[in-house]
Image (spheres, rainbow, N blue to C red):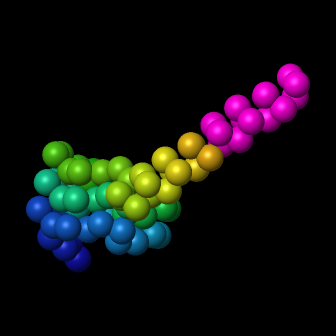
Amino acid sequence: MMENYRCRNLRGRSFKNQDLSHEDFSYSDLRGANFANANLTGANFNYALAGLTKAWKIILSILIVFFCTTSVFATFTAVY
């Protein structure tokens, strides 16, 4: 049975292991959605918004700053 996913907010939703063949996700917000092992054959993602959620962007930014700072500190410690 086909469900209408067009123009919907589907942030963070899990579609894991689902048959989504020929579903229409156009113009939907799919940020953080999980499509692991889903059948997406023929699915329409035109103009869909995808990527990381704001929370994940913040977490990754903090980790990048932490690792850069740590590597700079380790470099200066090793040199002197």
Please provide the residue range marked out in magenta.
67-80
Res 29 quadrant in image: bottom left
Location of residue 12 (image quadrant): bottom left
Secondary structure mostly taken by the magenta-highlighted segment of the chain: helix
Up/down of 78 relative to 23, above or below: above
Residue 2 screen position, x and y as percent: 20, 72
Residue sitting at 16 percent across and 46 percent down? 47
Whether residue 14 can be seen here: yes
Tell me if residue 75 is in the magenta stretch.
Answer: yes
Q: Residue at x 11, y 62 (%)?
A: 7
Q: Position of residue 17 (x, y in %)?
A: 46, 70
Left or right: 60 as drawn, with respect to 4: right
Foreground pick, 60 / 49: 60
Residue 68, placed above or below residue 16: above
Q: Position of residue 80 (x, y in %)?
A: 88, 25
7 or 3: which is nearer to us? Answer: 7
Name, please, the residue furthest toward the top: 79
